Amino acid sequence: MSKTKVMTLDKLKDQSKDVILTKEEYDAVVNSCFENGVSVAPGIDFGKDFGMFLRVCFTGESPDRLEKGAERLRKVLLNI
């Protein structure tokens, strides 16, 4: 079973730490992001060396939308 490394965002929990997920768990996080209105791209889409990451694009967004998106992403990541 392959494992994927996902970095938690700083201050999401009392102590920021790396979380190791199986491929199925990683896919579930990606799907949960989409279901919660956060557009992400699996890191593997950007090359084989980036498969352990999740990409979030926020260019051109207003501060209000950034705040809403960050809150949605926080909720997803807290449920890992």
Image (cartoon, rainbow, N blue to C red):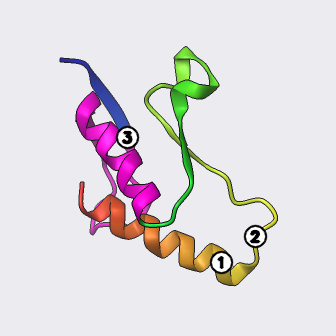
Can residue 9 be seen in this snapshot? no
Location of mark 2 (residue): 61
Location of mark 3 (residue): 6
Identity of the residue drawn at 34% across and 57% down: 16
Q: Specify whether 54 is left or right of 3.
A: right
Q: Secondary structure at mark 3?
A: strand
Instruction: Pinpoint residue 4: horizontal percent, then vertical percent.
Output: 33, 29
Residue range in magenta is: 7-35
Q: Secondary structure at mark 2?
A: loop
Number of numbered discs: 3
Q: Secondary structure at mark 1?
A: helix
Q: Residues within 10 Å of mark 3 (few under 14, many from 20)?
A: some
- Mark 1 touches mark 2? (CB < 8 Å): yes
Q: Specify whether 47 is left or right of 14.
A: right
Answer with mark 3 or mark 2, whichever residue precedes in sequence. Answer: 3
Type of amino acid under label 3:
Val
> Is 32 covered by the magenta stretch?
yes
In the rendered view, would you say 6 is above or below 51? below
